[in-house]
Structures are given as structure tokens and as C-alpha cells.
Image (cartoon, rainbow, N blue to C red):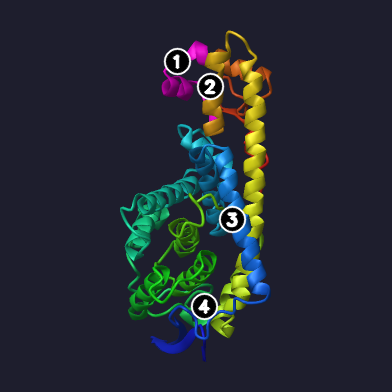
């Protein structure tokens, strides 16, 4: 079978045969139809993404980035089957708080590290968006824990498959190992506009789908493929930072997500995939913009309340600012971070509690953790937990 997306090639594995899919080079031939309804979808998605970039100016971009990257990390890992929530990740980052599912949350934490590393390399001009950068992100993602035995940072040298117990009964079989590097080389050139300029959103959509089709690593392909979307939007100037948690849409529409990717391979339906993607970009960008605006209003209101505390206000404001940045804090960590005494910190936290800003969430007498619960609830939509 051959279509504009690629062809099936018969392979042999012992006595059993199977068909592997070799993707056609990007850009698709004939080109993706960007007229009519697709043009309207693209315009709406691009506008929503621009609004998100503008809304980010209402908050410290580093603070927004801290929150949004962690939300994307949790969501993209949940698609792969981890049970970690945003609260788990924040607890883990807060001195490995007891009760955290360590294996899963380490996996999520490594995604945060991989995305920050790759985005920083691009923005600093140290390393372009390339196969080399994706391999380094993959190494950071899998170098410890369950993925450590799956050749972190290395393109696969054996056949992999999706679904089933072997290639012969798999849902999808990616290209054989000797076809992987040529396909990745074409993908890299496409990302760099060597075949002509492509709008950032179209490029991100097609590159993500092509990466998923190539499936170049033994593990972690889904997470790196979704990371690639954010990196393209940053590299092409569509977003100033990776503020974009597209995995929320993919998680909420998981069946349609996988079906749209598979229809590219079976029917050459690039348009169907692009339509699905653009609708998701608009929805998630609008949701993220609304979140940014809600957080900005919350922070302005609560900070004004803290400022009215009188003489205790200066130390309480310092603790409030850290709580706002971290969402979950402990007295000990706050004292270490701010260079304040423990009694001063505890008094400030108790004042924030009296204002309904901080809330103790462990129920313990020792190793107590305090949450900015209203901020958490605004941010946590879609990740599976209503309170920290």
C-alpha cells in the first residue's frame, strides 16, 4: 500500500512476516490544502496563540513558564500511563515530600528538565532545533529510572511497534531501523525550512505527526514528539516561551488523537490531522490565556490583602511571593530560601493562613506543607486532582 504519507514494506521476523510503514518525505505531495475552512482554522489558532503570548506579559514570564511547563509535563506523562498529578510533582520538588509516588513523579520531573533544557538552548542560540537537540532531550528524559535501559539519547537500532505483543499483531509498525535516520534527516530539513517556508503551526502539526510515525527511539517517543511542538513554536517565534500545554487537548481527546495520526498512515489524510490539531491549539491557547488572566487577578487581589497587614507585611509579602512562585511550600524550605528565621517564617505563614491564602495540606504536626490552594485550582484544570 502506498499513499501521499508513505508506504508499507513487507518485513520478515523469523517465520512471521509483518508490514512496516516508511513515511514519505515532508512536505507532503501534493501539498496540504490550506485554503477554505483550513485557512479560517489556522487564522483562529494563530490568533489564540498570539493572545496567549500577550497574556503572558501580565505575569512574570518565568513564573508562568514554571507553572505551564509543569502542567504540560504532567499531562504528557499521563498520556503515557503515569499516575502522577501536578500536586505530586510539586510535592516532589518540595524536598521529596512523603507520600509522593517517586518513580512516576521522577519521570515527570525529567520531562520538565528536558523541555527547559531544549528551549533554553534554542533561545540562547547555543543549539538549533535539530536531531542532536532532540537526542539530548531524550537522554535527559530517560537517563534514570525505567527508561535507562532503552538507549537514552540514541536512535533505535532494532524494530519497535505500537500495540500488540510483536510486530506481527501490532496496531502500527514504524519504519525498520535502516530507514529511521534518512526519515529524521528529512524531518530536520523540513523544520529548518529547507524545502520552503511553512507557517509555524502547520510545521508543528506535520512535524509532530511525522516524528510519531518514525518513532525513532525505543521509548519516550510520545513525550519527545509532544515536546517538539512547543520547541517549534518557540524556535519560529510563534510563542516567546513554551507556555503551551497541548497535551491537555490530546489527553481529553485521546482516541481521536491516535485515530487522526493513524489516518495519515492509512489514508494520507494530512488535512484531517491538521484540522484536529488547529482546533486543539485554539482551544488550549484560549484556556491558557484565561488561566493567565485569572492568576493575574488573583495575585493582584491577594497581594493587596497582604500589604494591609501593617508592620508584619514586609516578611509576609516575601513569604507570599515565594508561595505564589512555588504553590507548595514548607517553613523549613522558606527559611532556607529567604534567609529568614523559622519563627519569622512560621508567623508569616500563619498570617497568610488567616487571610485564607495559605492552607496546610498534610494534617500533620511536623513536616507540614502549605498550599496556595486557589492558585492550584486555577492551574490544575484537566490534570486529575482538585486540591493539593
* Residue drawn where x is 41% and y is 18% of the image: 339
What residue sits right under mark 2 in the picture? 319
Secondary element type, mark 3: helix
Residue 310, x across and y down, in percent: 62, 10
- 181 to 63, vertically: above or below: below
Q: Nearer the viewer, mark 3 or mark 4?
A: 3
- Up the image or down, 80 lies above or below 41; here it is above
Relative to 275, residue 125 above or below: above
Among numbered discs 2 and 4, the one appearing first in the sequence? 4
Local packing at callout 4 (Cα closer than 10 Å; few below 14, some 14-19, many 20+) is some
Q: Secondary structure at mark 1?
A: loop
The disc placed on residue 172 is 4
Q: Which residue matches tag 3?
A: 49
Q: CA distance from mark 2 to mark 1?
A: 10 Å
**Label for residue 340?**
1
Residue at 49% across / 82% down in the picture? 168
Left or right: residue 200 versus residue 283 is left
Name which of mark 3 and mark 1 comes first in the sequence: 3
Q: Nearer the viewer, mark 3 or mark 2?
A: 3
**Does the residue at mark 3 contact the one at mark 2 (Cβ under 8 Å)?**
no
Mark 3, Cα crowd under 10 Å, few <14 / some 14-19 / many 20+, is many
**Dominant secondary structure, magenta:** helix
How far apart are labels 3 and 4 at the CA level? 32 Å
Question: Residue 215: image x %, image y %?
Answer: 44, 71
- The first of marks 1 and 4 along the sequence is 4
Mark 2–mark 1 contact, CB under 8 Å? yes
Residue found at the far top of this picture = 311
In 3D space, how far apart are the residues under numbered discs 2 and 4 (Cα atoms)? 52 Å
Query: Magenta stretch?
Result: 328-346
| Residue 317 in which image quadrant | top right
Q: Which marked residue is nearer to the observer: mark 2 or mark 4?
A: 2
Amino acid at each position: 500500500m502506498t499513499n501521499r504519507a508513505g508506504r508499507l514494506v513487507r518485513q520478515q521476523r523469523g517465520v512471521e512476516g509483518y508490514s512496516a510503514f516508511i513515511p514519505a518525505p515532508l512536505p507532503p505531495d501534493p501539498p496540504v490544502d490550506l485554503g477554505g475552512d483550513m485557512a479560517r482554522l489556522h487564522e483562529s489558532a494563530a490568533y489564540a496563540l498570539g493572545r496567549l503570548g500577550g497574556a503572558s506579559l501580565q505575569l512574570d514570564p518565568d513564573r508562568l513558564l514554571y507553572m505551564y511547563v509543569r502542567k504540560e509535563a504532567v499531562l504528557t506523562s499521563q498520556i503515557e500511563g503515569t499516575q502522577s498529578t501536578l500536586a505530586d510533582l510539586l510535592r516532589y520538588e518540595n524536598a521529596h515530600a512523603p507520600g509522593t509516588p517517586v518513580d512516576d513523579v521522577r519521570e515527570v520531573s525529567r520531562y520538565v528538565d528536558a523541555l527547559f533544557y531544549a528551549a533554553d538552548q534554542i533561545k540562547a542560540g547555543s543549539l538549533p532545533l535539530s536531531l542532536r537537540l532532540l537526542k539530548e532531550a531524550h537522554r535527559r528524559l530517560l537517563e534514570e529510572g525505567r527508561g535507562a535501559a532503552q538507549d537514552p539519547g540514541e536512535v533505535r537500532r532494532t524494530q519497535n511497534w505500537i500495540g500488540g505483543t510483536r510486530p506481527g499483531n501490532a496496531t502500527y509498525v514504524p519504519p525498520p531501523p535502516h530507514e529511521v535516520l534518512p526519515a529524521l534527516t528529512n524531518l530536520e530539513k523540513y523544520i529548518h525550512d529547507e524545502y520552503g517556508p511553512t507557517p509555524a503551526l502547520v510545521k508543528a502539526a506535520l512535524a509532530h505527526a511525522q516524528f510519531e510515525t518514525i518513532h525513532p527511539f525505543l521509548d519516550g517517543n510520545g513525550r519527545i514528539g509532544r515536546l517538539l511542538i512547543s520547541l517549534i513554536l518557540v524556535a519560529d517565534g510563534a510563542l516567546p516561551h513554551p507556555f503551551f500545554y497541548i497535551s491537555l487537548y490530546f489527553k481529553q481527546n485521546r482516541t481521536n488523537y491516535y485515530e487522526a495520526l493513524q489516518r495519515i498512515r492509512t489514508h494520507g489524510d494530512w488535512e484531517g490531522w491538521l484540522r484536529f490539531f488547529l482546533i486543539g491549539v485554539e482551544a488550549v491557547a484560549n484556556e491558557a490565556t484565561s488561566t493567565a488572566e485569572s492568576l493575574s487577578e488573583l495575585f493582584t487581589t491577594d497581594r493587596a490583602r497582604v500589604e494591609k497587614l501593617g508592620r508584619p507585611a514586609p516578611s509576609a509579602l516575601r513569604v507570599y511571593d515565594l508561595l505564589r512562585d512555588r504553590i507548595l511550600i514548607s517553613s523549613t524550605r522558606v527559611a532556607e530560601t529567604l534567609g529568614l528565621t523559622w519563627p519569622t517564617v512560621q508567623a508569616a505563614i500563619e498570617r497568610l493562613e488567616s487571610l485564607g491564602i495559605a492552607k496546610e495540606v498534610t494534617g500533620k504536626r511536623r513536616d507540614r506543607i502549605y498550599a496556595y490552594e486557589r492558585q492550584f485550582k486555577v492551574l490544575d484544570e484537566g490534570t486529575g486532582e482538585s486540591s493539593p
